[in-house]
Amino acid sequence: MTHLKFSVLGIALCGWLALVTGAQAADDLVVYSARNEQLIKPLFDAYQKETGTHIKFLTGKEGPLLERLKAEGARTPADILMTVDAGNLWQAAQSGLLAKVDSKILNENIPAHLRDPEGQWYGLSVRARTIVYNTKKVKPADLSSYEALGDAKWQGRLCLRSSKKVYNQSMVAMMIAHNGEAKTEAVVKSWVKNLATTPFSDDDSLLAALAAGQCDVGIVNSYYFGRFKHKTPDAPVNIFWSNQASNGVHVNVSGAGVTQHAKHHDAAVKFIEWLSSDKAQSLFADANLEFPANPKVAAAPLVASWGPFKQDTINLAEAGKLQGKAVMLMDRAGYK
Ligand code: FE
C-alpha cells in the first residue's frame, strides 16, 4: 500500500517538475487546459514564434483541472485556465480561481454575451448546441425549436445525450432563463416521454444512432456534427438551426481566464488578447470545427456551409448561475 502510494506520488511529482522546472524565462506562461494538446499546441507555437513567449501547458479533464487549481491555491504555476462550456468557466470564477480582467481589446473582439460581465473569462470559440435529424425520415419544415421536440409527433423518435453532461445543463439553464422553470420542466418532461432510447453518454454515439435510424431527431454540439459529416459524408444526417423564430440557437463557448494567482498577469492578458485577434481566431476555431467568437473572423468553409443563424444572445453567465436549478429540474423530469 505504502509502496503504491509512493509510486503515485512519484508520478505526480514527475509531472509537476516537468511542468515547472527547466529554463523558465521570466515571461514564460503556464496554461492549464481542458482543450487537448492537438487543438492548443499550434496556437502556442505560433505565439512563441511571434512574440518569443514560451508557453508551458498541462492538459486534463475540466473537473480535475479545476480541483487541481483549487488545491494549489496561491502556489499554482498556472497563469491561464482554458476550458470548455460557460458552465465550467462560471464555476471557476465562482470558486475564486480567476482574476478580473478589464481589456479594451477583448471587449471589442468578443461579443458581450460570450464573456463574463465581470471580465473573469472570455469565450474564444463558439459551438452551437442544436437539432440534428435523419434526412430520410424528417424534413426541415417538421422542425422549429427545442421546445417543439416535446410534441406528440416525436414520440419514440427523439435521442438525447445524458443530462449529466454540462452541455445539456447549460442548455436547460438557458431555457430556464428564457421560459422560466415551470415551462422548462414541462418541456423536459415531454422530451423524456418522446425518447427513442436511454440517453447517450456522448454526442458521437447519438449521431451514429441517428444515422442508423434508431432515432429521427436529436440535439448535439455543432462540431460533433462537423466531425461526423467529415468522416461519413454520405450519412443521412443534417443540422437544423433551432429557435430561429424565437430566441435563437443555444450557443456555448470554449474560453479562457487569467488565474487569480497568476505570476504573469499582464503577459497572460496579452496572450488571451492575441487569441481573440483575427489571425489566432481562425486557428483556434477551425481546429475543432467551431465558430470564431470574434464576429469579424469567418468560419472554416465546412462550418460556414451550414448557413447563417441567429444565436441566443443572453449572457452565458446565466448558464452558470442557473446550472444548479437546471440539474434539479432535469432530475425531477426523469431525464437521466
Ligand atoms: Fe465536446
Image (cartoon, grey):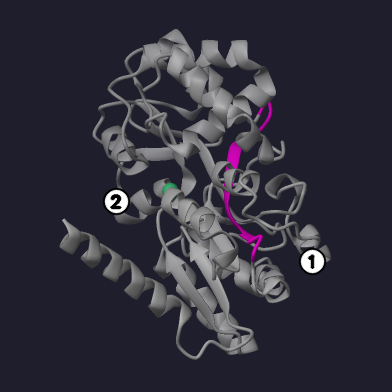
On the question of residue 143 being in view, the answer is no
Residue sitting at x 67%, y 40%? 317
Mark 2 or 1 closer to N-term? 1
Local packing at callout 1 (Cα closer than 10 Å; few below 14, some 14-19, many 20+) is: some
Residue sitting at x 72%, y 36%? 314
Q: In the rendered view, would you say 253 is above or below 301?
A: above
Q: Amino acid at mark 2?
A: Thr
Secondary element at image label 2 = loop
Local packing at callout 2 (Cα closer than 10 Å; few below 14, some 14-19, many 20+) is: few
Q: Is residue 26 left or right of residue 118?
A: left
Q: Is residue 260 magenta?
A: yes
What is the magenta range?
245-261
Residue sitting at x 53%, y 87%? 24
Instruction: Name the residue that disc number 2 marks.
Output: 232
Q: In the rendered view, would you say 35 is above or below 314?
A: below
Q: Is residue 10 left or right of residue 305?
A: left
Residue 97 image offset from top left, x and y in percent? 62, 54
Residue 182 image offset from top left, x and y in percent? 61, 10
Q: From mark 2 to mark 1, how far is it between C-alphas?
A: 40 Å
Residue 18 image offset from top left, x and y in percent? 39, 79
Residue sitting at x 52%, y 47%? 306
Residues under numbered marks 2 and 1 in contact, where contact means CB atoms less than 8 Å apart: no
Q: Amino acid at mark 1?
A: Ile
Residue 105 image label: 1
